[in-house]
Structure formats: structure tokens, C-alpha cells
Amino acid sequence: MPRTQTIIRPSFPTDYQSILQRVYAINPVRYGRTRNYLDGAVSYLSPYITHGVLTLPQVRDMVLENYSVQQATDFIFQLTWREFFYRVWWQLGDDIWQDIKDPQQDIRTYEAPTAILDANTGIYALDEAVRVLYETGYMHNHARMWIASVACNVCGAYWKLPSQWLYYHLLDGDIASNTLSWQWVAGTFASKKYFANQANLNKYSGIEQHNTFLDVSYDELRSATIELPRELRLVTHLALQTPLPPPKPISIDTTKPLYLYHAWSLSPTWKANEDAERVLVLEPSHFQRYPISEKRVQFILALAKNIPNLKIFVGEYHQLPNLDKASQVVFQAHPAVNHWRGYATGPVWLFPQLPQKMYGSFFSYWKKAQRYLR
Ligand SMILES: Cc1cc2nc3c(=O)[nH]c(=O)nc-3n(C[C@H](O)[C@H](O)[C@H](O)COP(=O)(O)OP(=O)(O)OC[C@H]3O[C@@H](n4cnc5c(N)ncnc54)[C@H](O)[C@@H]3O)c2cc1C
């Protein structure tokens, strides 16, 4: 029997003051020492960063109010991963849905391993991480790597469908970070596949377990000769759907500038002091293509409440009433709203000094970025 330990179940408040307090609570020194452990001092900020409530430079600068760059470098390093993935998405667009560098090797299925979805792999740390995901909408970074590795590199699933399953349930589900991380683990956006064995899980989860299909050496794991339990060979085809709220008509005052928000630009400070009509546009076509859970929909609607007088429009951009009569349409640039017309602000980068282009690897981006750490 495994020595069981419950994995932390974080909660995610939605009011802006609590979110800011969470940023000030970060201790980047403890973070650097413990972030790989499931009970480490991670920030739990990703849902807010994903939805644009906080920007990366805002988080960095708030941390640097209390810590030196040297103390905060490990933390800024991780923020930079997110920026790197965004740079790649801006550059490649929909091509991030194809294997980026090399085709995935040894594919056995294009579906998702049922045992992972059912939290029934027999590996306590993995199953518990999936249960935490379903309960809270969060999974620790290391657990995400383990799950993706078992799904793609042990069970032989093509990365796409399992990645969509994880994206669906995460409160921080982010097309760039999620898709490109899965590709990184599966070896299609990295020089090799990522593997973790039971000893690694035991060390970082605090849960001691032996005699599992992962309780083997890395050579055995990589050689793909391990005996998979029958349950791990069963697969499920997922048909995920987004339960958006029903569309309701809205009116738009065309004498004011029209500030449009999307689900990734929910900052209460963006143009806060200006007099404008403000509308959050939830496009069904987007959420059909990239489904998210009911929990995530409710989270987005709760975050939207931080923006005074924000109207909610469930419909396509071109269906907005009186769009052609609006004196000015302004929104925050984002790859998911490239089809919107008007004045797009941003994007806001940690390292605006670096040109927008394809960076071949995270480390080539980090190497250039380091010059601008202040
Ligand atoms: C398979 C897989 C899927 C992932 N899917 C997503 C996703 O959909 N959305 C998402 O935001 N992150 C994703 N990540 C990255 C990372 O797991 C999460 O950002 C992190 O776990 C969020 O928790 P935190 O806010 O406590 O992070 P912290 O460790 O406290 O880091 C602070 C911030 O830095 C950024 N960050 C940290 N680590 C990474 C990383 N490895 N890659 C990119 N950004 C990082 C995030 O914005 C995070 O909020 C994924 C990683 C893997 C391996």
C-alpha cells in the first residue's frame, strides 16, 4: 500500500483584492527551492494570468517590490516560459496544433487513456492529481508533466486529445502553454521525450509507492518494453462541450468608445478611468473549438465582475449590435481574436525589448531575455 498523503487542494478567489494579496504572498526564494514538490511554495497565479487579470510584468514588478532580481530569478524564469510559449503561438498561429519539430514517435492511439481520465492508473500520485484537477481546476506543474508523459510516452497516446482533456478541466487552461507543454513532453517540440519513473514521483509527491508499472529504470521506460497493465491500454474518445450561458440581447451606447474584452483580457485596471461601453464577448465558435468546463465558465464570469459595468455578450464578434456605428472599438491583442477589427492594444511582454520572431527553444529565448533582467 502506498504511504498516502493528500495533495494540496488550492482554492481560487475571484475578487481583485484577494488576487493581489496572492501576488504579494509569493516568496520567490522558497519558490526556487521547493517549486518541483507537489506541496512546494508555488504561486497558484496561473488562472489569473491566463485570464489577463494579471499581466506577467505586473506580477514580476510586484514581486520585485520586496525581493531582489537575484532572489526572484527562478520565479521570473518560470514566468518567462509562459512568455516564450506565447511568442511561439503568435508566430505559428494554428500551426501549434501540428507536431512542431519532429513527428511524435511510437503512437499507439489517437484517443485518451481511460485510466488517466478515470483517476484509475493505480499510481496514487497520478490518480490523486487527477482527482484534485476535477475538484479544483488545478494541477501542479510536475503532476502535469507526469500525466502527459504517462499518456503520451508510456501509453503511446498522440498528445492532442489528452491535452484537450486537461485544457478542458484547468482553470488556467491556456492554448499556448498547454499545447506546447504537451508537445514538449511528447518530444515533438523538444529534442527528446520526457520520462518520469516511480522514484521521481515518490520524491516529489511525498507519496511512497512501489511495484507499479513506473517502478522501473529510465532505460526500461525509454525502451518502451515495460508491461502495461490492461487498464492502461483502454482508451476513450472524448466529446467535450462548453456550457456557455444562453445569449441575451444587449444594447450598446454608440456615443461612447466601445471597449471589448475577451476571456483572456479580464484586467480591472485596463483603461479603468475612461468613460466607455465595456462588453465581454464570449464567442461560441471559439469555445466549440476549444471546449472548457462549467467550472471554468463560472470562473470567467466571476472574474468579469471585477470590471464595473461590463456587459456580457454570448455571440460572435460580427453579431455585436451597432458595431458599425461605434465611434471607436478597442480591445487587447490576443491570437484568439485576430479576426476582431478596431484598435488592438499590446501585447504586453515581460521582455518587450526582444523582437517578435520564432525562437527555436526556450533556452535561446531566456539567454536573450537575461540581458534585460533588471
Ligand atoms: C502538460 C502541461 C500542461 C500545461 N498547461 C498549462 C496551461 O494550460 N496553462 C498554464 O498557465 N500553464 C500550463 N502549464 C505550465 C505550468 O504547469 C503552470 O503554469 C503552473 O503549474 C501553474 O501553477 P502556478 O501558477 O502555481 O505556477 P508557478 O510555479 O507559481 O509559476 C508562476 C507562473 O509562471 C508561469 N509558469 C510556471 N511554470 C510554467 C511552465 N512550465 N510553462 C509555462 N508557464 C509557466 C505561469 O504563468 C505561472 O502562473 C502546463 C505544463 C505542462 C507540463
Image (cartoon, rainbow, N blue to C red):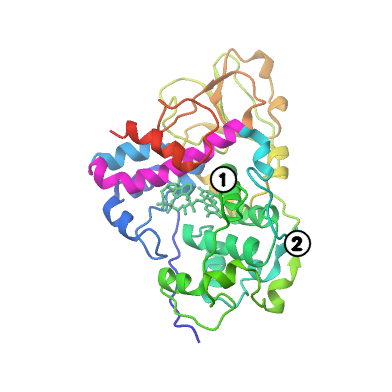
Task: Please give the count of numbered marks on the rendered protein.
Answer: 2
250 horizontally vs 41: left or right? right
Q: Earlier in the sequence, mark 1 or mark 2?
A: 2
Say if 89 sits above or below 326 in the image: below
User: Which is nearer the eye, 202 or 191?
Assistant: 191
Residue name at image x 52 percent, y 74 percent: 217
Residue 343: where, in percent of width, then height? 56, 18
> Circle 2 — which element?
loop
Tell me, yes or no, if residue 140 can be seen here. Answer: no
Q: What stretch of residues is rendered in magenta?
A: 66-91
Mark 1 within 8 Å of ligand 1, using the beta carbon: yes
Report the mark closest to the observer, 1 or 2: 2
Residue name at image x 74 percent, y 58 percent: 238
User: Which is nearer the eye, 4 or 286?
Assistant: 4
217 horizontally vs 373: left or right? right
Q: Which residue is mark 2?
A: 109
Residue 37: where, in percent of width, then height? 39, 64
271 horizontally vs 92: left or right? left
Say if 349 sits above or below 81 in the image: above
Residue name at image x 67 percent, y 19 percent: 323
**Mark number, residue 371:** none
Q: Main secondary structure of the magenta part?
A: helix
**Mark number, residue 174:** 1
Magenta-drawn stretch contains 21: no
Label pair 1/2, CB-CB below 8 angstroms: no
Tell me, yes or no, if residue 12 can be seen here. Answer: yes
Residue name at image x 48 percent, y 83 percent: 2
The part of the image, by quadrant, that contains residue 157 is bottom right
Residue 313: where, in percent of width, then height? 64, 34
What crowding class fits label 1: few (fewer than 14 Cα within 10 Å), some (14-19), or many (20 or more)?
many
Residue type for callout 1: Asp
